[in-house]
Structure formats: structure tokens, C-alpha cells
Amino acid sequence: MLSTYKIIQKVITCCLMITMAATAVKAQTTLPTWWFGVSGAANFNFYDGTTQRLNNSLIAPTAFHKGNGVRPYASILAEYRPAGIWGAMLNVAYDGRGGKFNDVVAPCNCPATLETSTSYIAVEPSIRLSVPSTGLYFFAGPRVAFNINKDFAYTQFKQPNTDAELSAMHKTLVSGQVGVGYDIIVSPAANTTMISISPFVSYHPYFGQEPRNIESWSVTTVRAGIALKFGKGHKVATIPPPAAIIPVVVHDFIFSVQGPGNVLVKHEVSETLPLLDVVFFDDGSTEIPTRYVILTKEQATGFREGQLQHEQLESMTDRSAGQLNVYHNVLNILGDRMRANPETTISLDGASGKGPKDAKAFAESIKQYLVDVFGISSSRITTRGSFKAHPSSEQPGGTKELVLLRAEDRRVDIESASPELLAEVGGVMMKPAQITSTQVNPLDNQVVFKVDSAKELLKSWAIDVTDSKGITQHYGPFSGDQQNVPQASILGDNPGGDYKVVMTAETNSGSVIKKESTIHLAHQDDEVQKGFRYSIVFDFDKAKSMAEYDKFLTGIVSPLIVDGATVSIHGHTDIIGEKEHNQKLSDNRAKETQKIIEHAIANSGRDHVKFETSGFGADPAHSPFENNLPEDRFYNRTVIIDIIPNK
């Protein structure tokens, strides 16, 4: 049986290679309506059922059941292919259905074999369904077969070999087939006589394929082969179009310079950080990973969640170690909240691909920590274990990034019906943590140089910046459409002034272009602007927010937006998946969030609110976190909402 499967694999592989190697033929003739030809194939026959009475004079002492064999198939064929997708096929063929049954042992402890040489003349009419603009087609229809050979060869150890004919054979069989093929035109495009090579595969189920009118022997066949077809087309008269005069267009590059304002704005952000109710475990260990903050019993006595609300100074686009530190204290935050609310209870649901026992050990590790360190009664904590997390990051049928996805499913989910522990987002995660930080947008102190179409049309470009004393600074070469240079780098010790900027570029064709501009630069004063930040965390590969988020955005976030405020909404994803898909996913997440907030603002009668909404996909320059840890990727599936009131 194994060798038969290998033969099937090789034949199908050859057919696919021929199909992939085909090149499209630009038709200079019409395709024929009628095709005629021949085909050759291998029948891979699989026997099932029972046979024991071979003929009227020989009954095998032990019944034969399963078997297989490869036999030839050859046909003459005709096809009718009118315009459109429907057509018809007819094959008249020699159809070999022989094979060898699996060996058995007679009661005398004697090995016995049985091989058949059954074959038929088969008539196979089929309906043909073509796929437009390709050579692919599907076919299905009945098979009427007339028996022409019923020989068998039976051997039994210490007994004479028997070569004879099977008795009780059906003279005519009526069954069916379905299949797929691919027409590859190999003749020159200008020829009216067209030649097609067509690899095909068909399947013949056992229905109607019982060779005999006694016992239960049946045959299932998979056929793989190649057809050679000939048809007659007609010439198509073509008139060449007049030669078009294509004007040479010289692109006029637009060069612009934009400097920062006179005020460097520092944003004091009161951030509401979603607190994931998940603890991830390392492969091969049931201990709480060392990246989580583990306290001693003495340290836990003095721990309070408010200690984590310290002020941070960082870039608005930096990956935030502060936020991740808050999450890595999730067990301490949970212990502090349960200690302050003695009526609360939780359920720890472990998940592990190694099984419920391993998963429950994860949950027991967390339970033991809360009991031993924070003094939480064990009766307030229940534990469970299962194979899969709910919801699972690994999707049914997924084949990519499985190492990362399975790491996300090796975890413990913290669940509770106690409102003191849950967020106002429908009870789907723990209450968020509050963080106050002071941040600076790095673009607020940058000089931005832009050259339109530079990436497509220029080999490189560079900048020369000259002050009023004639001192020139050179920057470059660059290749993108935009380049940022810190204002402090240009100013140096100068208090400020007017600068001449010259952009020199080399085009892809080798010509040199220059553009000039001016800019006034001065050192900036500091200003602190207060704002609010909220985050939404999405399930893996999902863009539509949960219904509970609608209430959260409408009832919690939107009331903080005053007339004249600016709302910055940025969508992000993790690194799993294709770049284009992640970009679209982050765009959809950001737009869905803006839609909900806009609706809430309109219903409250506020206006003059400016939205700055964009998606960054998995761009590492903008991702809130790294993508090395499961919690990094969970927090990167997010939309970040910054509310900046008017001055």
C-alpha cells in the first residue's frame, strides 16, 4: 500500500510541474470548439470488502479483504467546448482494474495470495466546467464498463497454483467519476491547428464498482494521467494600432523645509492602562517566570498599587518600560486588591498544549503565591486546567508563526465576578492601572526636509544648511521622501537666525537638480500641556471592538473631550502576519474607535474637535512595545487615544 501511495504522489507531482511550467499563449487564432485526442493514465485501485469463492470449483480456505494495485488506462477522446464555461467530454477506453489482495494465512498455517487481472472497455461521458481565462477545468459524469477480462492467480503454500477466471462476474458496471484537469496549449500562437497537453486526476468511488454479484468485494480508483488533444481554430485578423507619440515629461520636484515651533511642548499625560488579566508561562516550566515582579511576604505587606503610578519622562513614541513594569506587577496588584476587598473571589484558568495537568500546575503556582505572600485565603481561589486558552491566539487551520502563537496560549487567565477587580468594560479584564508621565513628541524639536517622489525618482539627495556667517553644514545622502534633523544639531551654539537651505539630488537617469529654500530657527521655550490617554486592547487579528468597548468609549472617554480639543488615535498590531494585512488591520482598529467617539460627541452637542487618526501596523518605530514576549504582542494589538485639550 505504501509503494502505491508513493506512485500516486509522483504522478500528481509531475502533473503539477507540467502545469506550472506552462506559459500563457497570446491567442492569434480562435480556440477550437471540437477537440479530439488520446489519453494515458495509471489507475490506482484500492480493494475493500470480502471475496472467498473464486469460482465454482475453488473456495479459498481464508477470505481475502483489502488490497491494491496499479493498472493501465488508455482512451480515445472527444471534447465539445462552445463559448462559455460549459462543455462535454467523451472517453472510450481500456480500463484496468486489477490488483493484488493482501496476503492471508490458511488454517493449515499456509500463506496464500490472490491477484486479479480484471479489465473493462469503459464508456465515460462527462460534463465539463471550465474556469474562465485559465486552462483549469473540472469534469463529472457516469462510467459504463463492459468486462473483458476476469483472470485471477491464486497460490497457497504446499498446494498447486491456480490460474483461472473468477465466476459470478458482472458483465456490465455503472458507476461514476469526478475529476480536474489543466489544458496547456503547446502549439505556436499563429497556428490554426492547436495542440494541448492536459494532465488530469479523477476519483472513482466504490459506488457501483462491485465486480461480482456475490460477496462484497468493491473497488475504489484514483486515476492520474495526461491527455494529448488536437483542435482546429480560425485566424483572427488584427490591425496594429497607430504608433503613439509619448511626450517626455520632466518631473518638477517640490522641496520643502519645516521647522519646529518656538515652544517645546511637554505633555503631562494621565494614562489609563489596560491591565491584562493573563499571566504567561515559559515552555518547560510551571514556575511563575522571573520577568514578573515576585515579592517576599515582608515586601508584600508594604506594597500598594499606587506605588506604581510614578512619573516618567520619555518620548511619546518610545516603547514604555514603565507600562510593562506595571503589567509585570499584575499578581501584586491582584493581591493588593483582594487584600483590600476580602469578599472578592477569583478563578485561575490555566491552558497548556501539554494538557490539563500541566495547565492546572500553572494556576496552582499563582494561587500559592497569592496565599503565601499576600495571605489570601485559598478558599477564595479556584483553579482549572485545559488544552486551549479562550480565546486562543492559535487559529484553526493556521500554519504560520505557530511558535509565537502557542507561546501566547501557554498561560493562566484571571477571572472574577467581583466588581472590585473588574474593569468597566463589561468585566472582560481587570480594572486598569493609572500612570502619570511627562512625554515629549520627538518631532516637536526636529527640522523636517521633504522631497516629493524622491524614493521613486532619485538615486540620492543631500542638504547644505548655511547660516548668516557663511558657515555651511552638510547632511546626507538620503534616499527617502522625508528626513528629520534635530534643530539643536543645526543651531549648535548659535542663538538662532535665518538659514539658507540647498537640496542637491541625482536622478535615476543621472542628471543633477538643485532646489533652494530658507528657514528661521531659534531655541525653544518649554511648555507643559496636560492631557489624557486611554488604550484599547484587541483580540488576535480582530478589528471590531467588543460591544463593551462602545460603552467604555462613549461613557468614560468621550466626556473628557472638550470643544476645541485634539484627539490623536493611533492603531497598532503585533508582528504576526503579513505587513500589508497588519497595516490594514491597524487602520480599521483606529477608524472603528474614531467612529464610536465621533458618534458620542455628536450626540452631546460638542463640535470643533480635531481628530488625527492613523494606523502604524507593526512598524517597530511606532510600536508601543517590543514583540519578543507574549505580553508585548498582546499590548501591541491596541489603539491608543490621546486627548489634548485646547490651550
Image: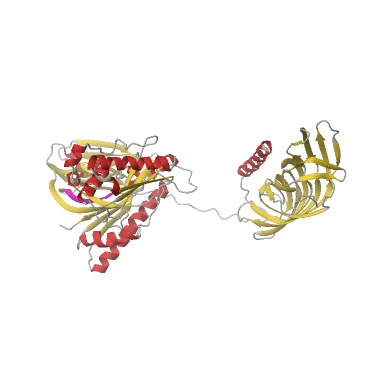
| Residue projecting furthest to the top | 158
Q: Nearer the viewer, residue 95 or 546?
A: 546
For the question of whether residue 391 can be seen, the reply is: yes
Q: Is residue 429 left or right of residue 157?
A: left
Query: Which quarter of the image is occupied by the C terminus?
Result: bottom left
Horizontal side, residue 576 vs residue 448: left or right: right
Q: Could you tell me residue 158's position as x and y percent?
A: 83, 30
Front in this rendered view, residue 468 or 412 = 412
- Residue situated furthest right in the rendering: 57
Instruction: Give 251 or 105, whichever is nearer the viewer.
Output: 105
Q: Position of residue 547 (x, y in %)?
A: 34, 60
> Which residue is at a point 63% across and 51% down the rendered structure image?
136
Q: Is residue 626 visible?
A: no
Residue nearest the viewer, comparing 94 with 293: 293
Q: Residue at x 65, y 60 (%)?
A: 84
Q: Image quadrant for the N terminus? A: top right
Q: What is the span of residues highlighted in magenta in the rendered image?
A: 265-275
Q: Position of residue 439 (x, y in %)?
A: 19, 46
Instruction: Tell me which residue sits at (41%, 41%) in the image.
Output: 357
Magenta residue check for 329: no
Task: Please identify the dominant SS of the magenta region.
Answer: strand
How many badges with numbers are in the image? Answer: 0
Taking the image as shown, residue 10 lies to the left or right of residue 367, namely right
What is the basis of the colouring in this image? secondary structure
Is residue 105 placed above or below 34 in the rendered structure? above
Q: Is residue 269 magenta?
A: yes
Residue 134: x and y, percent? 61, 52
